Structures are given as C-alpha cells and as structure tokens.
C-alpha cells in the first residue's frame, strides 16, 4: 500500500522548525507583492515562520494547515500580528479569501492527486489580478513520488501555470536530507503573477 500523507510526522517536523530562517521563496514573494497588498494566503503554514515574516512586513495573512499541533502557536502569533489561522485539510477547501499573494512552501504535493486539481483551481481563483503565486511543487523523480500525493512532471507544472505570467520556474534535482533522513529531491519553485 502507498504510504499516506496522513502518516507523515508533520507535527514532529513543525516542532523542529523554530530556529530556521525564513524561506527564500517567501522573501522573493514579498518583494514581488505590490505596495498596499490586500493580503496573503499561506497553505501549509507549519509553525508560522513565513506567516510571521509576511505579517511583520505589513501583509495580513490567512494561514491554513492540517496539523492541529501548530494551532496554539498560530493563535499566539495572531494575538499581535494580522494573522488568521484555520486548521483544515487542504483537500477539502472549496474557496479561499481573495489574495495578492498565495504562498505555499513544501506543502501542495502532499495533497492527493484526486483532490489536487480542484485545490489548484481554488488557489488560482483566490489570486486577485496582479496577484503573486509562490509555491514549491515536488517532481515525479522525487524519492517521495509513489507515496500519496501529487508528484508532477515538468509539462504538468507548465500546464498548471497556463494563463499566468511565469516569473520564475526553477526545476532542481539533488541528493540531500529531509526531516526523515537522506532523500533525493526533485522540486519546482514557482513564482507567477495573475
Ligand atoms: C513539509 S511541511 C512544510 C511547512 C512549512 N511550509 C515549511 O516550509 O516549513 C508541510 C506542511 O503542510 C501541512 N499539510 C500537508 N498536507 C496537508 C493537507 N492535506 N492539508 C493541510 N495541511 C497539510 C503539514 O501539516 C505541514 O505543516
């Protein structure tokens, strides 16, 4: 049986993130968001490191994550910053708040193929005209391809971006480590504008 996303130790992963740097994708995305942003959505916010960064830089953020263990930390952040957190399975989302930025770091590929297309439609619908999409996607040569999730060929990624202005599409393959051990990574870093 294919390993399920629900069996991944996201709580353990998120608990171990507190000391890490803000992801470069979030920094790049903030630089692209026009002044006077009407807000951001972050899917798979984990421990809230990127959401805090955006909020501290004047962008209000709606965050979503299925890991219940991060909810107290997100509630703490929300006390002092413009962050609204929802615990939800991304597969079940049917709409999102309109946003000038949709950010998702190392998350969307954990959504099963059966739900991915619908979620992608929801994400694209949430983008305001001029809004920025900043996401990581995992490729079909990633070590985790074959587990539950959506691991994409390059032509599939290009198809997902049809109709958007692609600002950056960087495909990378490397041997490295993940939270659970050595891993071959195959990823796409996407920055696009509606
Ligand atoms: C690898 S972590 C990345 C977290 C954070 N964005 C980062 O860059 O460190 C993936 C995150 O996505 C969340 N996640 C994975 N699948 C999900 C799903 N179907 N619905 C909601 N959240 C999900 C996990 O709980 C976890 O916080």
Image (cartoon, rainbow, N blue to C red):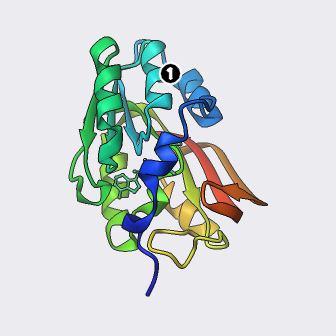
The picture quadrant where one finds residue 182 is bottom right
Provide residue 82's location: percent of width, then percent of height. Answer: 32, 17
The residue that label 1 is drawn on is 53
Provide residue 69's location: percent of width, then percent of height. Answer: 33, 43
Q: In which quarter of the image is the N terminus?
A: bottom left
Relative depth, front residue between 182 and 52: 182
Secondary structure of the residue carrying tag 1 is helix
Furthest residue in direction bottom, as rendered: 1
Relative depth, front residue between 137 and 158: 137
- Please say whether residue 85 is visible from this viewpoint: yes
The picture quadrant where one finds residue 112 is bottom left
User: With respect to residue 169, does 85 lie above or below?
Assistant: above
Circle 1 packing at 10 Å, graded few (<14), some (14-19), many (20+), is some
User: With respect to residue 178, does 127 lie above or below?
Assistant: above
Q: In this view, does 7 lie to the left or right of 157?
A: left
User: With respect to residue 149, does 26 lie above or below?
Assistant: above
- Please say whether residue 125 is visible from this viewpoint: no
The picture quadrant where one finds residue 130 is top left
Rendered residue at 65%/33% (across/down)? 24
User: With respect to residue 36, does 47 lie above or below?
Assistant: below
Q: Total of numbered circles in the picture?
A: 1
Rendered residue at 52%/63% (across/down)? 159
Q: Say if disc 1 is inside 8 Å of ligand 1.
A: no
Q: In this view, does 119 lie to the left or right of 30?
A: left
């Amino acid at each position: 049986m294919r390993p399920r996303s629900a069996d991944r130790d996201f709580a353990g992963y998120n608990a171990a993130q507190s000391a890490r740097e803000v992801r470069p994708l979030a920094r790049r995305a903030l630089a692209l968001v026009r002044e006077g942003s009407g807000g951001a959505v972050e899917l798979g916010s984990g421990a809230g490191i990127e959401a805090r960064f955006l909020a501290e830089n004047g962008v209000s953020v709606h965050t979503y994550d299925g890991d219940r263990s991060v909810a107290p930390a997100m509630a703490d952040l929300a006390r002092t910053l413009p962050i609204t957190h929802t615990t939800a399975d991304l597969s079940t989302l049917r709409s999102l708040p309109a946003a000038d930025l949709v950010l998702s770091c190392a998350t969307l590929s954990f959504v099963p193929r059966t739900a991915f297309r619908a979620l992608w439609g929801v994400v694209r619908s949430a983008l305001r005209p001029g809004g920025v999409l900043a996401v990581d996607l995992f490729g079909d040569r990633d070590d985790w391809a074959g587990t539950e999730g959506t691991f994409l060929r390059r032509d599939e990624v290009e198809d997902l971006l049809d109709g958007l202005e692609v600002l950056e599409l960087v495909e990378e393959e490397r041997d490295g480590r993940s939270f659970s051990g050595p891993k071959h990574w195959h990823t796409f870093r996407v920055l696009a504008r509606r």
